[in-house]
Structures are given as C-alpha cells and as structure tokens.
Image (cartoon, rainbow, N blue to C red):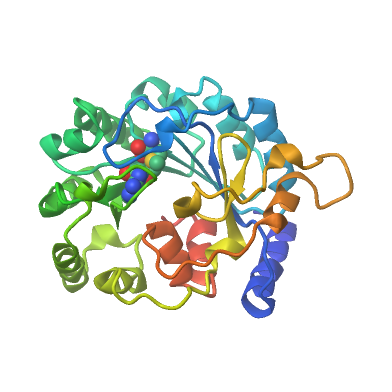
Amino acid sequence: MNIQKAAGTFFRVLGVSLLRKSYPLLVNIRVTNRCNHECIYCNVPHRQCDELSESEIYSVIDMIEHQCVFINLYGGEPLVRNDIGNIIDYISKKNGIFLSLSSNGTLVPDRISELEKLNLLLLSLDGPPAVHDKHKGQGSYDHVMKAIACARARNIPVVVMTAISRYNIRHFDHILEKAREMDFNVVFQPVISGAQDNSEAYPPIEEFHALVARMIKTKEPRLSSMSKKTLQYYLKWPHHVEDEIDCLVERISCFLDADGSLFPCTSLCDIDYGSNIRREPVNSIRPCGINRAFRNLSKTHCNQCWAVDSVEINKNPFLLSALKRLILKKV
Ligand SMILES: C[S@@+](CC[C@H](N)C(=O)[O-])C[C@H]1O[C@@H](n2cnc3c(N)ncnc32)[C@H](O)[C@@H]1O
C-alpha cells in the first residue's frame, strides 16, 4: 500500500469511527451464483441470474480501488467462471487491496496457477469425509484436501471456513488436527438459514455453546483468526438479542450480488435493497456506480448476527485490529 492510500485509509477509518461516516472499505463480490456443489444449507445456486461480465467487474474495481482495502471474491463457486484468473490478475495489480477468494476447492488443483496472486484462499472444510460429503456432496472431502495441499505447496495462505451444523458439531477436532498437520487457520460459524428451510441442519444451541467454551478454554492457536471477543459473542449466541445492533458492517462494507445488486451484509442477500450498480450511471460526476449504490443502501435493523466476518467486524469496533491484520496480511 503506498503512502497516499495508507493516509486516505487512515482518515476514512477515523471518519467511520469518530464521525459515523460510511465507505466501502471491504467489498465482497459474488462473481457467480453457479456452483458445482449442492450444499445442504446453501440456497445460492438456486438464485440463477444474468451475472456481471468481466468488464462490468473491472469497472466496479476501478470505481472502488482508491478507498477499498479488501476484496473477497465468492459465489456460488467463483472457479466455475472461466475468466476468474483474469479477474484475480486485474485486482492484484491495484494498489493496497488485500484479495481473497472463497472456494469449495474442487477446481483449485486444476487452476492453481491462476490463484497464486491471492493474498488468501478461503476453503470450506466441514469435517471428516462422511460429514463433509453429507454437507457438500460425494467426493468433496477428497477434493478440498487436495486443494489445501496444493495451495500450501505454493505458499498460498489458506484459512478454512467451517459451517457448524448438527451433523459435524462433534467432529470439529478433525478440522483442528488437519489444520496443525497442513498449516492453516480455521474460522467457523453456525449453519443458519439461507432462504430455503434448512432448520434441520442447525446446530443444537447447547452443544454449540459447549464447543465455543472449549475453544476459548484451550486457547486453540489454529483459531487465532477469530478474536476472543467473537468467540465470547458466540458463547451466548443467539440468546442475548439486543434491540438493534449498531452495525459497523453496513458502514464499511457491502456485498455485490452476481446480478449487480448491492446489499449490506451476507445474511441479508435475499432482501431487495433497490440498489443495483447496473442502474447507476458510471460516467457521470462522482459518486457514481457502486459508490452511489452503496450510499443508497438503507440501514439494516438486525438484532443478532451469525456470520463470522460480520461478528468479527462488529466486535472490533475501531477497526484497527481488523485493518491491521488485513493490511499486514496477517490472516
Ligand atoms: C456461500 S459459500 C461460497 C464459496 C464456495 N462455493 C464454498 O463452498 O466455500 C461461502 C461459505 O458460506 C458458508 N455457508 C453457506 N451457506 C451457509 C449457511 N446457511 N449457514 C452457514 N454458513 C453457510 C459455506 O459453508 C462456505 O464456507
């Protein structure tokens, strides 16, 4: 990150923290809804749409590059896009943007050379073979293991994301064992509803709390990408429902859907916020395109939160620790 961008970021963080301003510092781009898996808890592949083209994604990147410090490419499965290597390449040439991509791993070995410019590869691992495959489809455990090995062999940092359900909650230690053996960090979040009814898969709350309590007690080093405050939040989740969360996520980040619509948070993607970058002029006076769509987003009114990245941001309200980790690439 050059000095100009670092200074701009510093003042934006101050603006967010002290003056309650909003900037899209962290942008998640759902590059496709298409997926080569059918996970039991995910409804994204059922939301077919006319997805953003490569050049539309480039114009989004051009519009946010001065203020954005973090981009995550996710889906669906981002690697089903033939042009994903070009998109990674394009973003990696921009100044001071930490780039990550979320994948189920299946196509990672075939496309590993296109992923080398990532700062972080987020892979989903939900347990030992039988439970992982129950979540994500026959044979998917072997694929994600190959993906982890392949990425680590090329020195690409890997963080594994585990969705905790009633089926894998007793198998979390398997993931930690693999993390020690193969050198990656782990973050987890409870399985919770997408739009489809997947309530059968929800983890039993007492067992979920017991797992979190054990992780806090053992100070599990492989969970160091989750702050203690986040773990303590999950220790009570979702019982301590507040009236309304004063949500920082909506002020510093946004989620761009595959069809160009914008929403404030991953858990709110089925609500129409009436904000779509395709409807915003891109060549007029600023703010334009995604920046204007971002300003048009209305406030969320959540009273609890389950998504680990959002909890992490809200539990580190001055952003400094989160940004420090992002900027110093300490994942
Ligand atoms: C939507 S997926 C997209 C990236 C990629 N296809 C993958 O499988 O990792 C990103 C992450 O969200 C998690 N996820 C999806 N639906 C979820 C739900 N209903 N509850 C909790 N986590 C969920 C997945 O387990 C995965 O780790």
- Asked whether, in this view, residue 7 is left or right of residue 210, the answer is right
From where the camera sits, is residue 2 visible?
A: no
Q: Where does residue 272 sit, x and y in percent of width and height? A: 58, 48
Q: Where does residue 295 sit, x and y in percent of width and height? A: 71, 58
**Vertical comparison of 217 with 211: above or below:** below
The quadrant where ligand 1 appears is top left
**Vertical comparison of 273 with 319: above or below:** above
Residue most extreme to the front: 197
Q: Residue at x 17, y 73 (%)?
A: 217
Q: Quadrant of the C terminus?
A: bottom left
107 and 45: which is toward the camera: 45
- Asked whether, in this view, residue 297 is left or right of residue 183, the answer is right
Q: Where does residue 144 sit, x and y in percent of width and height? A: 27, 33
Numbered marks: total:
0
Q: Quadrant of the N terminus?
A: bottom right
Q: Residue at x 56, y 22 (%)?
A: 83
196 and 167: which is toward the camera: 196
62 and 284: which is toward the camera: 284
Snapshot quadrant of residue 106: top left
- Asked whether, in this view, residue 115 is left or right of residue 108, the answer is right
From where the camera sits, is residue 197 visible?
A: yes
Residue most extreme to the right: 285
Q: Where does residue 244 sit, x and y in percent of width and height? A: 48, 74
Q: Residue at x 12, y 50 (%)?
A: 171
102 and 296: which is toward the camera: 296
**Vertical comparison of 198 with 4: above or below:** above
